[in-house]
Amino acid sequence: MASQTPALPPSFTPGTDSVFSDLSGFYSLDSNVPGLSKVILNKLNMKDYGDYRAAVEGKTKGISFRNYKEMFQKMEETFKFCTGCNKLPEHLAEGQTLKRCVKCLNVYYCTKDCQRHDWPQHKKVCKTLRLVAIDRLVEWLMFTGDLPFPTEKWSKSAAEVTSWDDWLPMQGDLAPRLDKVVSGANMAALWKNVSRPMPSDDDLRRSSWRIQSEFLSRALTLGMAMRHFGLDPYEKPLTVHLAGASHSETMGARLSDFDELSHMFPGHQGVEVVMVGPEVVDGPVVRPPLRAFGPKHSVYISAYKGLYHQFWEDVLEKEEAVKPDLVVGFHPGFHANQGLVEGWLPSLLLLRDYNIPSFFTMYSETELRYSLQILLELEVHVRESGANPFASQKPEQVQACPNKPPVYCNSHYVSFQGLLPQEDLEGPAAHS
Ligand SMILES: [Zn+2]
Ligand SMILES: [Zn+2]
């Protein structure tokens, strides 16, 4: 839902707040550093965004784990531009090279002067960007199977677990599980292939946890959304649609990815999660949705590649899938620009008009604010919004703007259902 590839509308207005995860990310890169998206595609040997998508979806060779070194080099080069003046490597004078900030190993400068000039801004984020640079590599362990590590059964009820601070003590000592990840063969192989020193074990443990938190954040947010709308998985089986599911949720997705929900609601009547989005990546989760109820006590994942409103027309209305009890959207990104609003519009109106409990997350408070504005313009009844207590702990760089404060997956949320009540539409009664 976040994009319609590969055609790029020429009149597209680039957004500036999106992170590098979808099509608007590409425009965002270019609006801040002209030519950067081209550099990324070139380094990855791709001619356009369609190629990039194909590679991400594993349809082309080139990005593979047998080729760690080259891939990481190419990935790193996509971060090479001067944070001070936005100069790209090809615009440097003869003999000049971009130098990396030695503290974070994450941003580059063309000259000492540029770095000195940028320091007042960069120093605010340098410490966090050091973590970003570590996480960007460690997160590949999600694809090797080292992460996520297994989690424990819950000793408290879902109602009692309202944040990470409640969740963590139920897990006991995480150290042995994290140590196993840190000392694994894949971790060693990873750092052998990148042009930077291996961080300390403690840094790697913390990084592994941050990546795991991003993974768990999805299931926990989904469970929180169920509770938010008073949906009880003990009363009846529940169907949750993940509208606008992107490659970040579906690339390498496993059938067990939402099993934390079974820890949250042990012995539930069955939960089905249907991931729907044009960026859905092929894999074991891509299978037809259930026409009726799924297996009790377990979470059943299915996925459909296409826009959400098309899924309704093509599948749901033909009774090949059940109606959702809840629709969740992770970072729909419709705040970013007109193109994405238009892509989402039919789906947002559908959710509104069918009165479906809906719960969307954002990367930042700014995104939330813009999203709220759009929902209000659509006369959607917003129930609640705010900071998500199960936000990912992994900071993410706004790629083309390294000095912007890093953002976090699922950091904020908005819940909405149905049409704004009439009295709210007319505003405060003026005079009689
Ligand atoms: Zn510069
Ligand atoms: Zn730095």
Image: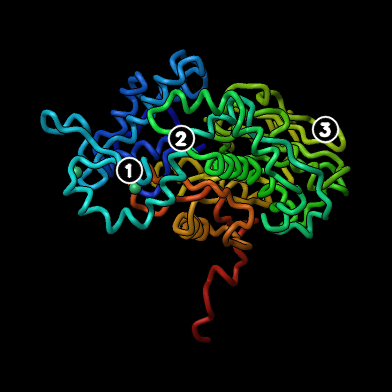
User: Is the C-beta of the residue carrying label 1 under 8 Å from the nearest atom of ligand 2?
Assistant: yes
Residue ID for mark 1: 102
x, y percent for residue 193:
44, 23
Residue 3, label in figure: 2
x, y percent for residue 200:
51, 40
View quadrant of ligand 1: top left
Corner quadrant of residue 13: top left
Q: Which residue lies furthest to the left in this view?
A: 94
Horizontal arrangement in the rendering, residue 127 relative to residue 301 (left or right): left
- Neighbours of disc 1 within 10 Å: few (<14), some (14-19), many (20+): few
Closer to the camera in the image, 74 or 276: 74
Q: Mark 1: which amino acid?
A: Val
Residues at badges 2 and 1 in contact (C-beta under 8 Å)? no
Residue 316 seen in the figure: yes
User: Sequence-wise, which precedes: disc 2 or disc 1?
Assistant: 2
Residue 352 seen in the figure: no
Q: Mark 2: which amino acid?
A: Ser
Residue 294, label in figure: 3
Residue at mark 2 to residue at mark 1: CA–CA distance: 36 Å
Residue 289, label in figure: none
